[in-house]
Image (spheres, helix red, strand yellow):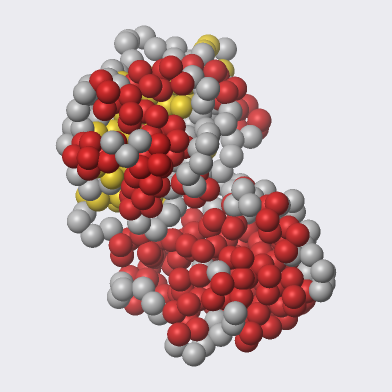
Amino acid sequence: MSRLRRTAPAPPVRVVHLGLGSFFRAHQAWYTHHSPDAAEWGIAAFAGRSAALAEALAGQDGLYTLVTRAADGDRFEVVGSVSAAHAATDHEAWLGYLASPDLAVVTLTVTEAGYRPGPGSAVERLVAGLVARRDADAGPLTLLPCDNLAHNGAVLARAVTGFAERADPRMLPWLTSSVSFATTMVDRITPRTTDDDVRVVAAATGVDDAVPVVTEPFSEWVVSGAFPAGRPSWQAAGVLLTDDLAPFEQRKLWLLNGAHSLLAYAAPLRGAVTVADAVADPVVRRWLGAWWDEASVHLPQPAVELTAYRAALLDRFANPRMQHRLAQIAADGSQKLPVRILPALRAERAAGRLPEGATLALAAWVCHLRGAGGPVDDVRAEQYLPLARGPLTEATRRVLAALDPEAGADPELVTAVAAVAKELGPS
């Protein structure tokens, strides 16, 4: 059994990525690997949490196997765009890359929760790196967030600018003149890698890869923004460059990500473990259709396009070989529901309707917080778990109010969510 090793020098580092994980390696790193100028655009990737992942990847010269798992079989390829992998604690390396004039782009996959500024946060690390870059007079660069947040470039800009202003107000003129905040929409389902996946790669390729990544055939990346120091030729690898990201972003957040959140909290209450399990259940399929119907009313695309997009999503969700676990999707609902479910809910309430799909998604989340369907993994669990205890209707009101004061102050909505939660799970 051989090990992954480079036979030629790694590409020079011109991109730094924060949040070394499966999605980044199946998406941004994959697109960079497939760009025609990939030999000029190496990535230095920093782990968000797991030093072990960075160590394992570094032990393979940054190489890893990407398994594209279609319904009719697997396709294997070795991705070589990660030139270096570092633990989150390697602050010296982080500052060194940010201070280099060779660096042109910083990308991030830190989850929705990662954009909350504070000590030890991704935002603090970015600002520390930007201070080093300013002091080194290393030139302009672009920050490119790649998480499922509406207007993620603007969200990151506010977080970074606010933190920098508190840390050193003298940073602001330099930020304005030298740092561009681009916006993206990303889409590729990437479940957590299992021990079985490692064995499959070894058996199929003869390579002992400690950190392969499994993903689906579908992939989409839409980018909007300026890159004053340059970027890989991502458009030649399939990236769509646009001046108006909003329609793509909204459709994906509501129809794909919103559906994922509904499935993650509601389907386990009927025994489902994976997304494919969930959509194989006719009751869950009906719930999903209700959510898509009410969300689609408020999307700008023509009905025929939305119908085709929904059909494609069902095909992706139903792929039985992906094993996309609902417990993985269920993490950090307090950060995801406000951008995936609440906008369509508000639009429906403004139209005088009480939407079934959105109500069910919130009710299932209340059940999740009350112990039904699996353990809670949420960055704000300490806040929400106490709110979800006690009599169901009052607990529902408290949870909704913490999620969105307007929702908590809507008695008809609170009553409806509590009633559905009572039907779904233990009271």
- Residue at 41%, 17% (x, y): give it: 93
Q: Is residue 337 left or right of residue 34?
A: right
Q: Position of residue 246 (x, y in %)?
A: 30, 62
- The answer to whether any part of residue 24 appears in the image is no
Residue 115 drawn above or below residue 122: below
Q: Position of residue 31 (x, y in %)?
A: 32, 37
Q: Is residue 123 left or right of residue 416?
A: left
Name of the residue lying farthest toward the bottom:
352
Q: Quadrant of the N terminus?
A: top right
- Residue at 43%, 17% (x, y): give it: 92
- The answer to whether any part of residue 104 appears in the image is yes
Residue 211 drawn above or below residue 21: above
Q: Position of residue 371 (x, y in %)?
A: 78, 59
How many numbered marks appear? 0
- Residue at 51%, 68% (x, y): give it: 341
Which residue is more in the foreground, 64 or 156?
Answer: 156
Which residue is more in the foreground, 175 or 320?
Answer: 175
Q: Position of residue 42 (x, y in %)?
A: 31, 23
Q: Quadrant of the C terminus?
A: bottom right
Residue 287 drawn above or below residue 60: below
